[in-house]
Each structure stands twice: as structure tokens, then as C-alpha cells.
Amino acid sequence: MNTPSSLLPAPVRPATEGRSWLSSDHCAEPVLALLSGLGWPMVDTPEANVHCTSPDGRVYVGWLPEDPGAWQRGIVWRIQVQPTGADATSWTQEFGIRTPSEAVAGFLAALIANPTR
């Protein structure tokens, strides 16, 4: 069956202007602003790494631009989660230098949006 082209939806072409954040600028500000706004304690190291922990202590976020071990693994962001429950297993998510901080902030916002998980 052939559908006339006049009945097909128009192709969607996302706008590309205003999306400079798609190319990482290696800036931690979007993540740190999110966590600071939520009242997460932050510790800056002399090496320029930043460590954040959720108020309940179950989520750790590390911005590790000067951590040799992180660089060897090709990461700058490390997120560790310790779920509650007897069968809960901790897990880790890491992001590389080419991952925009806005994407990491979006991941964290979704993660912490539902505190019952």
C-alpha cells in the first residue's frame, strides 16, 4: 500500500542553534550548580577535584579532572550509588572528558528526582 506524500508527517529536523553544549567545554558548573542548589556538601581538593555527597550519604559524585587514576580510565565524572535494602547492590557510573556536563547534570537530575528508588 502506498501512502500519498501529502498524508505523511513532515520530517522533524532538530534546531542546531543554541546547542553549543553538545560539544563539551570541560566545565563542571552545570553539575556543581545542581548539587549545590540541592544542598549537597562539596569538598574541593588542592588538585582541583571536587567531591560531593548527597545529604543521606547514598550518592557520591566526583569531578576528577586532575585524578591520575581517573585519567588512566578516561573519565572525569564518577557517580557511586548505594541503594537501600537487604538485596541492594551498589553501582557506579562514569563519564569521560567528551561527555558534556549538561548531560551528566541531566543524568543526576533524573537519578535524584525519585528518592524512593
Image (cartoon, rainbow, N blue to C red):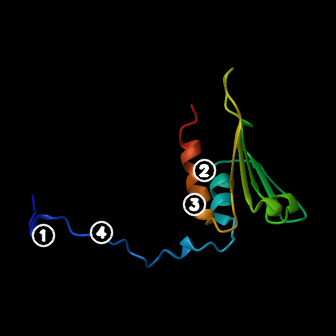
Left or right placement of residue 16 versus residue 116 in this view: left
Q: Residue at x 86, y 58 (%)?
A: 69
Q: Give the residue pinned by disc 2.
A: 108
The numbered dot on residue 62 is: none
Find the residue positioned furthest to the bottom: 17
Q: Give the residue pinned by disc 1.
A: 5
Q: Earlier in the sequence, mark 4 or mark 3?
A: 4
Is disc 4 placed on a helix, strand or loop?
loop
Amino acid type of the residue that numbered disc 1 sits on in the rendered structure? Ser
Instruction: Determine whether label 2 and label 4 are within 8 Å by CB.
Output: no
Left or right placement of residue 54 versus residue 47 in this view: left
Q: Position of residue 7 (x, y in %)?
A: 11, 64
In what quadrant of the picture does the N terminus appear?
bottom left
Q: Give the residue pinned by disc 4.
A: 12
- Calculate the distance from the C-alpha at mark 1 to the C-alpha at mark 3: 37 Å
| In the image, residue 4 above or below residue 40 | below
Q: Position of residue 109 (x, y in %)?
A: 56, 50
Q: Earlier in the sequence, mark 2 or mark 1?
A: 1
Q: Give the residue pinned by disc 3.
A: 103
Choose between 66 and 37: the one closer to the eye: 66
- Calculate the distance from the C-alpha at mark 4 to the C-alpha at mark 3: 22 Å
Amino acid type of the residue that numbered disc 3 sits on in the rendered structure? Ala
- Calculate the distance from the C-alpha at mark 2 to the C-alpha at mark 4: 28 Å
Amino acid type of the residue that numbered disc 4 sits on in the rendered structure? Val
